């Protein structure tokens, strides 16, 4: 039941915040914070309670009937992967409320309603084990996100919001069709018509059907991720969204795509996934290199950061199709580290724009002298983005590359070039914005206490991930093993050399927990 | 016809009796409130009376009408919807100087036609129903006779409806000539033995489809829709879009299923083409419209295209999906036209997209209802439209209708664009236009429809179970 409360608190909080906005402009912020902190607290409590139990099964399960007529139920469950994602969701949610404290001063009630409803949709996606329910939440987050972009966005917001909505909605519908076909295939095989994920996992179907259905799921997840031919919505949406919107888009919405791959595509279609793996890895490599190249070419700072997401998310799909634990741990770490580092960069861009009213990096330069704190933060997160050891992204990308090396050497070599690209664009950010000559004289204030605190939390997080990643590995391990097992079981015939080699013992086995 | 039959005819008698009583009252007093109260009362009474038919259905009243679960549910929906239309009309009748009561009388006649239509099992009752409905509609459409748009719309509807009636009559005549029967059951038996193959029969069937296609505004018989939607007052447009189309669609469902026409390849082909064309034409033509009523007109063409998919499934699941979709569509459309009607003033229809700029910041609750309606039309979760579309796609996938399912999905995406256009307009910075205060009956309608949209969208189980009784006729 507590899982349902996690979602309900956000939904109710959103409605209350909206109503409260009528009386007082500031009240919605506190209501949103309260709802998010409550959820964070509950999640941490669950985490503390279950993190030590060494079970491979779900930590918590909640199931209630919803539309039994079609075998649809409110089936929610939590495992290591989802709890990590939930923690990330609520922390970034709190930050997105905090960074909007000054930026958003119109219609605060409706703004926080949208934020909380997006987050409730995302929470639902990370918890649902019923495919219909999953799709329900998958769609639920779109409308409030659309409002967030189209009402509080920048100049070109309407265009960006349409593009975002139509891309995601179209791909979602294709997934929905695939879900329905899967439902009927399973129903005709077994006589049990249900959308329940554990039951659908073992569905037997012809390889050709499996490939088609998998592609249906993939389209939705790859658009969200995004993977290169389908990434077109991302730069516009990220650039035009208000800072909180960009933060949630980059930090959370993209992660739902990665989560969908790990949770649904691999376990439901293991054989088809193995067939698709080379293409998947290729898409990853293309994303890494193309994203890096485009990021380097941007003059709009926010667009630049948006393209780095394309590049970073390339590692996710690359790792997913390597099918081994090293790579999977890298993927999970990348999901978290990218959310924090890119989120921080978006926040920084937002703060810069608030102060100098432009995002054009040709009009910046030499800002370090005036805003050293901001510069230092920019330095840390640019370094994170380029993969400096000691910060979370390094762990993520290093593990992913190590894992993929076992699966495909050529792809790994090409993907490694992406690190060079990352260095180029990250240093360019620093060079153009904080170092060099002042092109235009700006008189600006450095970060306020609130802004420093937000940045402080993010810095602690990224350093923690970089230095002590073991906790994350331990938490995610059982969930990832489930995904990998489905691949192992089907390919135990041994048509590719990568199976059977994941006796990954995470570095020194820690004894202090 | 015996005494027991009368108890089943009570709803019909109430709906038919009310306008007669009102005509008598008009001769005595012109007090609008009395007439208005009376018509609301009669509708509620008719609605309640439907619950008492429940014990021994299906029941055939002679060979003309049948009261089975399907027709009772649809009669309930129709009467409930006309109750809402009556509530909506209050706003609009306020501005009308004379002939207020007459409007209500004609409305009752149209409702009578609709409920006959959904329970017809015979060509005669079908034709009586559809003509009663159409003739009442001409009057309602052209009711604001000072407006040239209204006259144009009325004449357009009149001419096309007459032509379509001619098609219907000719079609029925050809079928009768071939089978010698006018009652659906018996036609089905005759078809079963003789087969469906003779060209004359098929021609008769095709002509009936043309006639019904006009009423449903399916492509290529759709051209009247945008003009009529625009010209008629918003409550009447709501009536045409919901009750009139819903009743004809319900009839078409019964007719096709009872005749088992979906077994015929040619019929399938024709309906498939009409369905796909309606979806694409409706959605594409809606894309660049600037007038909300016209957008909704084109959207209704596309929606009827989606509905035809359920016909083609040829299964009980299809009937259930159609029933759910129709009800969802009726509630949603009532909400949308309700908002338009309630924002319209004395000699002004709030129909231009630009009128709605930034309405959210001035009338948040009205816009919430409007947005819910638009999202429901677009098929976004937590609204009834989502569940309805789910049901259709579900039935379509089950019947392997890939072409139709894929074009439905494609069209949902195209449709999204113009729904988003309206929603975006509602939320842009405000302009200075003033809108009238919304009357209590109007607020009631908005509240009921919004609740309905959310209820069907979040807890549809009850309805799904109710409709699961619809199997065969």
Image (cartoon, coloured by chain):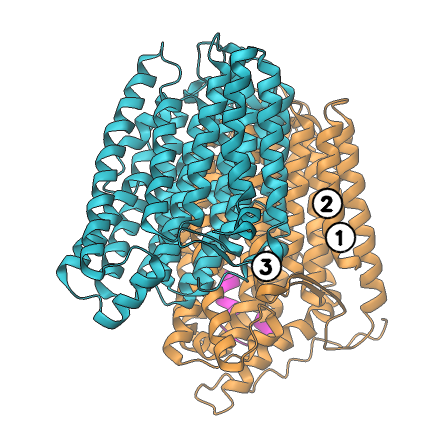
Rendered residue at 78%/35% (across/down): A31
Relative depth, front residue between A494 and A293: A494
Separation of residues labelled 2 and 1 (CA atoms): 7 Å
**Rendered image: mark on residue B56:** 3
Q: Residues within 10 Å of mark 2 (few under 14, many from 20)?
A: many
Separation of residues labelled 3 and 1 (CA atoms): 48 Å
B166 lies left or right of A38:
left
The shade of chain A is orange
Indicate the chain coloured cyan by its letter: B
Relative depth, front residue between A208 and B197: B197
Chain letter, disc 1 residue = A
Disc number lying in front (3 or 1): 3
Instruction: Please check the rendered image and state whether residue B220 is part of the magenta-colored stretch, yes or no.
Output: no
Disc number lying in front (3 or 2): 3
Q: Are marks 2 and 1 on the same chain?
A: yes
Q: Secondary structure at mark 3?
A: helix
Magenta-colored span: A315-327
Rendered residue at 63%/46% (across/down): B455
Q: Quadrant of residue A441?
A: top right
Is there a contact, CB below 8 Å, between mark 2 and mark 1?
Answer: yes
Return the x and y of residue A298 as percentages of the image width and height.
42, 39
Numbered disc total: 3
Q: Secondary structure at mark 2?
A: helix
Return the x and y of residue B52 as percentages of the image width and height.
63, 49
Disc 1 target residue? A6
Return the x and y of residue A137 as percentages of the image width and height.
60, 53
Disc 2 target residue? A10
Return the x and y of residue B154 as percentages of the image width and height.
31, 23
Q: Residues within 10 Å of mark 1 (few under 14, many from 20)?
A: many
Is there a contact, CB below 8 Å, between mark 3 and mark 2?
Answer: no
Q: Secondary structure at mark 1?
A: helix
Separation of residues labelled 3 and 2 (CA atoms): 48 Å
């Amino acid at each position: 039941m507590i899982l349902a409360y996690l979602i309900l608190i956000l939904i109710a909080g959103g409605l209350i915040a909206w109503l409260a906005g009528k009386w007082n402009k500031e009240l919605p912020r506190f209501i949103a914070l309260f709802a998010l902190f409550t959820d964070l607290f509950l999640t941490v409590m669950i985490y503390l309670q279950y993190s030590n139990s060494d079970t491979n099964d779900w930590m918590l399960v909640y199931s209630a009937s919803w539309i039994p007529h079609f075998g649809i139920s409110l089936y929610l469950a939590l495992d290591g992967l989802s709890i990590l994602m939930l923690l990330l969701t609520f922390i970034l949610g709190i930050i997105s409320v905090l960074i909007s404290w000054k930026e958003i001063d119109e219609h605060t009630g409706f703004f926080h309603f949208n934020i909380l409803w997006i987050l409730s949709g995302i929470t639902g996606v990370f918890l649902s084990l019923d495919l219909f329910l999953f799709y329900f939440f998958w769609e639920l987050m779109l409308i409030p996100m659309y409002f967030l972009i189209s009402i509080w966005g920048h100049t070109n917001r309407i265009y960006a919001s349409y593009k975002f909505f139509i891309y995601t909605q179209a791909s979602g519908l294709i997934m929905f069709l695939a879900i329905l076909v899967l439902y009927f295939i399973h129903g005709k095989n077994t006589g049990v018509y249900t959308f329940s994920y554990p039951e659908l996992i073992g569905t037997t179907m012809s390889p050709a059907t499996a490939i088609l259905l998998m592609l249906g799921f993939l389209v939705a997840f790859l658009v969200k991720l995004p993977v290169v031919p389908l990434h077109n919505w991302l730069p516009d949406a990220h650039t035009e969204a208000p800072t909180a919107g960009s933060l949630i888009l980059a930090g959370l919405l993209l992660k739902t795509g990665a989560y969908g791959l790990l949770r649904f595509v691999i376990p439901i279609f293991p054989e088809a996934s193995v067939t698709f793996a080379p293409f998947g890895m290729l898409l990853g490599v293309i994303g890494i290199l193309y994203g890096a190249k485009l990021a380097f070419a941007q003059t709009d700072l926010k667009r630049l950061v948006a393209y780095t997401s394309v590049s970073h998310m390339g590692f996710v799909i690359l790792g997913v199709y390597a099918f081994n634990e090293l790579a999977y741990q890298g993927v999970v770490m990348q999901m978290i580290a990218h959310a924090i580092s890119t989120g921080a960069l978006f926040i920084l861009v937002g703060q810069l724009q608030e102060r100098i009213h432009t995002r054009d990096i040709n009009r910046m330069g030499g800002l370090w002298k005036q805003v050293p704190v901001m510069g230092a933060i920019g330095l840390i997160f640019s370094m994170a983005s380029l993969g400096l050891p000691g910060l979370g992204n390094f762990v993520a990308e290093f593990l992913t590359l190590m894992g993929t090396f076992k699966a495909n050497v050529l792809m790994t070599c090409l993907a490694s070039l992406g690190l060079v690209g990352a260095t180029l664009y990250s240093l360019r950010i620093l060079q153009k914005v904080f170092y060099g000559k002042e092109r235009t004289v700006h008189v600006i204030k450095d970060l306020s206490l609130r802004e420093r605190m937000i940045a402080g939390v993010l810095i602690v997080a990224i350093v923690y991930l970089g230095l002590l990643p073991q906790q994350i590995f331990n938490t995610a391990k059982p969930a990832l093993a489930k995904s990998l097992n489905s691949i192992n079981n089907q390919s135990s015939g041994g048509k590719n050399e990568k199976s059977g080699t994941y006796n990954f013992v995470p570095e020194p086995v820690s004894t202090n927990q | 016809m015996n005494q027991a039959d009368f108890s089943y005819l009570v709803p019909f008698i109430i709906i038919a009796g009310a306008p007669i009583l009102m005509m008598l009252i008009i001769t005595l007093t012109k007090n609008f409130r009395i007439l208005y109260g009376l018509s609301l009362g009669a509708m509620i009474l008719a609605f309640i009376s439907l619950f008492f038919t429940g014990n021994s259905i299906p029941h055939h009243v002679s060979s003309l009408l049948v009261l089975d679960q399907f027709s009772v549910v649809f009669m309930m929906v129709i009467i409930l919807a006309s109750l809402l239309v009556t509530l909506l009309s209050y706003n609009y009748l306020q501005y009308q100087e004379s002939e207020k009561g007459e409007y209500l009388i004609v409305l009752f006649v149209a409702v009578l036609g609709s409920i006959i239509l959904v329970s017809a099992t015979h060509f005669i009752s079908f034709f009586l129903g559809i003509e009663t409905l159409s003739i009442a509609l001409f009057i309602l459409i052209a009711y604001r006779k000072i407006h040239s748009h209204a006259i144009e719309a009325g004449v357009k509807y009149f001419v096309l409806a007459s032509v379509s009636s001619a098609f219907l009559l000719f079609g029925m005549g050809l079928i009768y000539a071939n089978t010698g029967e006018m009652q659906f059951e018996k036609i089905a038996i005759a078809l079963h033995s003789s087969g469906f193959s003779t060209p004359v029969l098929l021609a008769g069937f095709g002509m009936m489809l043309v006639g019904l296609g006009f009423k449903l505004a399916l492509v290529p018989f759709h051209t009247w829709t945008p003009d009529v939607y625009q010209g008629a007052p918003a409550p009447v447009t709501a009536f045409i879009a919901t009750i009139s189309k819903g009743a004809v669609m319900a009839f078409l469902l019964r007719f096709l299923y009872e005749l088992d026409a979906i077994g015929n390849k040619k019929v399938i082909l024709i309906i498939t083409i009409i369905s796909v064309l309606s979806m694409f034409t409706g959605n594409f033509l809606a894309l660049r419209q600037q007038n909300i009523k016209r957008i909704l007109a084109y959207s209704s063409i596309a929606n009827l295209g989606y509905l035809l998919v359920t016909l083609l499934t040829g299964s009980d699941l299809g009937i259930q999906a159609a029933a759910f979709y129709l009800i969802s569509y009726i509630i949603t459309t009532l909400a949308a036209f309700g908002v338009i009607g309630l924002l319209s003033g004395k000699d002004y229809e709030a129909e231009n997209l630009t009128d709605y700029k930034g309405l959210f910041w001035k009338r948040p609750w009205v816009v919430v209802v409007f947005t819910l309606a638009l999202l429901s039309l677009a098929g976004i979760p937590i609204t009834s439209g989502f569940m309805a579309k789910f049901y259709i796609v579900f039935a379509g996938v089950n019947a392997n209708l890939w072409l139709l399912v894929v074009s439905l999905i494609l069209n949902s995406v195209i449709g999204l664009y113009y729904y988003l256009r309206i929603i975006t307009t509602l939320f842009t910075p405000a302009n200075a236009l003033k809108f009238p205060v919304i009357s209590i009956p109007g607020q009631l309608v908005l509240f009921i429809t919004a609740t309905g949209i959310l209820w069907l969208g979040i807890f549809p189980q009850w309805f799904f179970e109710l409709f699961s009784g619809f199997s065969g006729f």
